């Protein structure tokens, strides 16, 4: 499969083309690994029906699900989006691949496959939207978040921290953590994970607080 050629748009769900391209990649990897849908689903901790939806471009997979599927294949999750783009290591703003969309949260890739010792993402959060949860973890890596705009409440091991533009926080990905946009405007953050984490976690949409 070629480079991930669908470019990001502001907010919303992934496009049909993006979902179809991801589905084709998962189907290709599953075929190479000689796994049935049921076997892949069991390894990834999801249902066979959900794997079928992903492969047919009908599911809007969360970051946690992508991580678990990649772990089932023994690869970094960014490799679900194909090899490095042919234009080299330069990545223009308007060419950042949109990797996952979870409700009002969209994740964009900065590090390009093949992934080395660090994983970098940019995540955009609509007001009142978030990811993670009271039991969400993924692997045991060092994770650093730098807020670029807006206000994000980041909860680590049950402790809340409100971060604004320029603020940062770091923790181990084995710590439970959740992110919520508690401001009235769209928030954006840069995420740096080293080494890239491959552990399975559960990502849920967090309702806005009063």
Image (tube, rainbow, N blue to C red):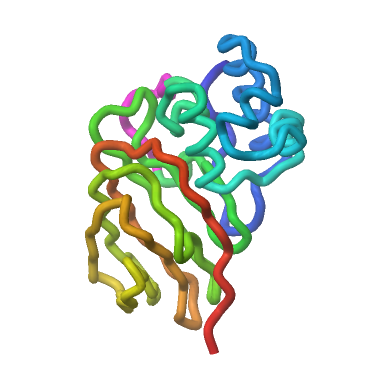
- Residue at 49 percent across and 30 percent down: it is 70
Location of residue 14 with respect to 123 vertically, above or below: above
Q: Is residue 170 magenta?
A: no
Place residue 51 in its image quadrant: top right
Q: Which is nearer the eye, 45 or 197?
A: 45
Q: Quadrant of the N terminus?
A: top right
With 70 as the anchor, is 162 left or right in this view?
left
Q: Quadrant of the C terminus?
A: bottom right
Q: How far from the left and from the top, in percent, is residue 65?
A: 56, 42
With 134 as the anchor, is 27 left or right in this view?
right
Location of residue 135 with respect to 8 vertically, above or below: below
Q: Main secondary structure of the magenta part?
A: loop
- Residue at 27 percent across and 28 percent down: it is 116
Q: How far from the left and from the top, in percent, is residue 92?
A: 39, 40
With 187 as the anchor, is 165 left or right in this view?
left
Location of residue 125 with respect to 26 vertically, above or below: below
Give the residues in magenta. Answer: 84-92
Give the number of callouts: 0
Location of residue 34 with respect to 205 vertically, above or below: above
- Residue at 35 percent across and 42 percent down: it is 139
Q: How far from the left and from the top, in percent, is residue 18?
A: 64, 37
């Amino acid at each position: 499969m070629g480079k991930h050629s669908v470019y990001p748009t502001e907010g919303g769900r992934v496009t049909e083309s993006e979902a179809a391209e991801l589905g084709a990649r998962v189907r290709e990897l599953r075929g190479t690994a000689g796994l049935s849908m049921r076997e892949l689903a069991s390894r990834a901790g999801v249902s066979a029906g959900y794997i079928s939806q992903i492969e047919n471009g009908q599911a809007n997979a969360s970051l946690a699900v992508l991580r678990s599927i990649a772990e089932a294949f023994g690869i970094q999750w960014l490799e679900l989006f194909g090899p490095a783009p042919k234009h080299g290591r330069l990545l223009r703003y308007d060419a950042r691949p949109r990797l996952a969309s979870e409700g009002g949260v969209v994740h964009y890739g900065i590090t390009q496959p093949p992934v080395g010792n660090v994983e970098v993402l940019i995540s955009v959060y609509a007001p009142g939207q978030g990811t993670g949860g009271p039991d969400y973890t993924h692997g045991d890596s060092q994770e650093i978040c730098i807020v670029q705009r807006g206000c994000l409440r980041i909860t680590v091991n049950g402790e809340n921290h409100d971060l604004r533009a320029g603020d940062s926080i770091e923790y181990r990905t084995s710590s439970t953590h959740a992110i919520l946009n508690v401001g009235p405007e769209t928030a954006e953050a840069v995420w740096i994970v080293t080494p890239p984490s491959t552990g399975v976690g559960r990502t849920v949409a967090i309702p806005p607080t009063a």
